[in-house]
Amino acid sequence: MLEVAGIINLAVAGLALTWIIAIAAMPKRSTLHLTWAVFCTGLTAVMVREVFGDALGPAAPLFIIAGCGTCSVFWLVARALFRTRTIIGPVELLLVAGIFAPTVIDQAVLSPVMPDIVKSIYFPAMADGLDGFQTLLSSTVLMLAFWEGLRGWSGGLARNERRMRLLYLSTFGLCVSTCVMLLDHGSAPLSAELMAGIQAACALAILIVMSVAIRYRATHPLTAEAPARAAGPASADDRALGRRIRDALTSERLYLDPELKVAGLARRLREPDYRISRAITAGLGEPNFNRLVNRYRIEHAMTQLHAPDSADLSILEIALDSGFASIGPFNRAFKEMTGQTPRAFRAAGRSALTRLAAE
C-alpha cells in the first residue's frame, strides 16, 4: 500500500507542478491563478516529503515550511473561486501567516546552529502552545474554505454553477473530514499503509476537482451583475408574466428587501427562475433583474432625498431604507441612473425648494 500511496503522491506532485508551469506561462494571471499556484507549490512540497522523507537531507525544513501553504492558502483559492471581487488584505495575510509562523519557528529552533539551551527552553515551554494555535487557525481556514462554496447559494445560481459547487463541497467536505477527523484523530484502527493510501487519494481527488472548478471558472466567470441575454421576441406569456412581476414589485414593494433575488421572486410567483429572467428581459424590456430592481430602489431613494420629512435622514439611512445593503452599490447605481451623486441630488432639491419659497 505504501508503494501505491507513493505513486499517487508523485502523480499529485506532477499534476500540481504542471499547474505551476502553466500559470507561470500565462500572459495575464488572476488572483485565482496566483493563489492556486501557491497552493500547488505547498501541495508539491507535501507530496515530495511524503515520498522521499529523510532523503531530502538539509532541504527537508524548506519542504516542511512550504507545506504550510496547503490548507491556509486553499482558503484564499476558494475566496477567489467563489467571489466576484477578491481582495487579499491584512486580515487574510495575518491569518495565513499565523499558520506558517509555528512551523517556521520550529524549524529555526531545530536547526543545527541553534544552541541546545534554546531548544531545551523552547520545546517544553512554547512548542505545544504554538502547535495548538496553528491547529486552531488551520481548522478555521478549512471551515472558511467550505463556507465560501456556500456563498450566494440562495441567489439564483445557474444550474452548472450549482453542480460545480456541489462537486466542490462534497469532495472537499468528504476528503477533509476523512483526513482530519478519521485519520488524524485515530477514530478507526487503520494501518499506517492504509492511512497513507487514503490521504494520497484524498489529495488527488481535491486536486482534480479543483482543476475542473478552475477550468470552469475560466469560461464561466462570476460577475457582480450578470449580462443580459438575448431574449428573442417576447411572447404573450412573457408579457403577462412581466406584468405580474411589475405588480409584485410595486404593490408589495419587494424591491425594498435587500435580499431579494431572482430565485426568491420566482418562488413567490411560483414560476421557474429562467421564466422570470426571460420575462424581465423580453416581456419588460429591462437589461436584467438587478437593473429592474435597482431602478425601483433609486426612484424610492429620489423621493426620500427630496421629501421634507426625510431631511434628517443620512444618505446611508436612505440607501438602507431603499433596499440597498451598503452605501457603495447605492452611490454607483444612483449616479448611473441620474448622473448625480445622492448628495448632489439632495442639494439640488433643497435649492429648488428654497427658490420656490422665496418666490
Image: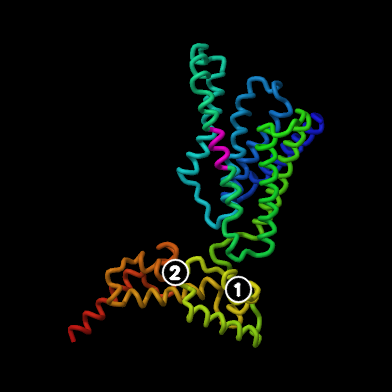
Q: Which residue is mark 2?
A: 323
Q: Residue at x 22, y 84 (%)?
A: 356
Is residue 171 depicted above or below 245 in this figure? above
Q: Residue at x 66, y 32 (%)?
A: 185
Q: Residue at x 69, y 50 (%)?
A: 170
Q: Position of residue 87 (x, y in %)?
A: 50, 50
- Image quadrant occupied by the N terminus: top right
Range covered by the magenta-colored residues: 134-141
Is residue 329 depicted above or below 140 in this figure? below
Local crowd size for mark 1, using a 10 Å CA cut-off: few (<14), some (14–19), many (≥20): some
- Image quadrant occupied by the C terminus: bottom left
Q: Is residue 112 left or right of residue 194?
A: left
The Cα atoms of the two marked residues, 1 and 2, are separated by 18 Å
In front of the other: 66 or 203: 203
Q: Amino acid at mark 1?
A: Ala
Q: Which residue is mark 1?
A: 266
